[in-house]
Image (cartoon, rainbow, N blue to C red):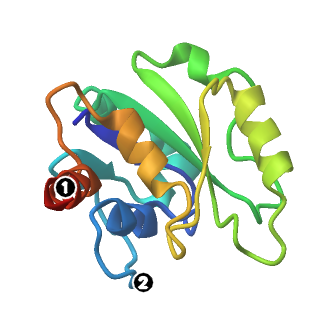
Amino acid sequence: MRKIMLVGRSEAGKTTLTQALKGEKITYHKTQYVNYYDVIIDTPGEYAETNTLAGALEIYSYEADVIGLLLSAIEPYSLYPPCICAIATREVIGIVTKIDHKDAEVEQAKEWLRLAGCEKIFCISSYTGEGVSDILEYLKENDDVLPWEVAKAKDDALR
């Protein structure tokens, strides 16, 4: 599995997405420092929101294969300036979170991520699970076997 670093402002859904990607129960947890979980790097929102801390994201990005820019579908503005992805030394994908929220403006969030330079954009709800498997499939490498593939193989063997 390719390693992904999740970047976004506080409350964008980075830690919740981390829990969903790992198949864990969703519980609120404020990220205080950069957390490494096998193939997921969860970063504090303050790193993306504060110029003095933003440089740390560049350093941590060298440990990742893919950078995921998270933007909540209920954001009133975009944290990311236009064409920011052009300076990245890694592949950058966009991830729109909270698509199940009653005030979600998914198309607006997708447009902001496109303006930032994201060519591949995923829309997810960590609570319902919608779109989470798409990200896992995208990060999957040739030799990786995902849990639902194992379950399907067992089910097929029983038929």
**Residue 58, numbered circle:** none
Q: Amino acid at mark 2?
A: Tyr
150 relative to 132 in the view: left or right = left
Identify the residue shown where x is 22% and y is 53%.
Answer: 156
Identify the residue shown where x is 54% and y is 74%.
Answer: 128
Front position in the image: 138 or 85 = 138
Indicate the position of residue 26 as horizontal and vertical percent values: 39, 80
Dot 1: what SS?
Answer: strand
Contact (CB < 8 A) between labels 1 and 2?
no
**Residue 37, numbered circle:** 1
Front position in the image: 19 or 133 = 133
Determine the CA span between mark 1 and mark 2.
Answer: 17 Å
Indicate the quadrant where residue 103 lies. bottom right
Residue receiving disc 2: 28
Indicate the position of residue 143 as horizontal and vertical percent values: 14, 29
From this viewpoint, is residue 55 visible? no
Q: Is residue 115 above or below residue 94?
A: above
Identify the residue shown where x is 46% and y is 41%.
Answer: 54
Dot 2: what SS?
Answer: loop
Looking at the figure, which quarter contains the C terminus? Answer: bottom left
Front position in the image: 85 or 27 = 27
Q: Amino acid at mark 1?
A: Tyr
Q: Is residue 40 above or below residue 32?
A: above
Looking at the figure, which quarter contains the N terminus? Answer: top left
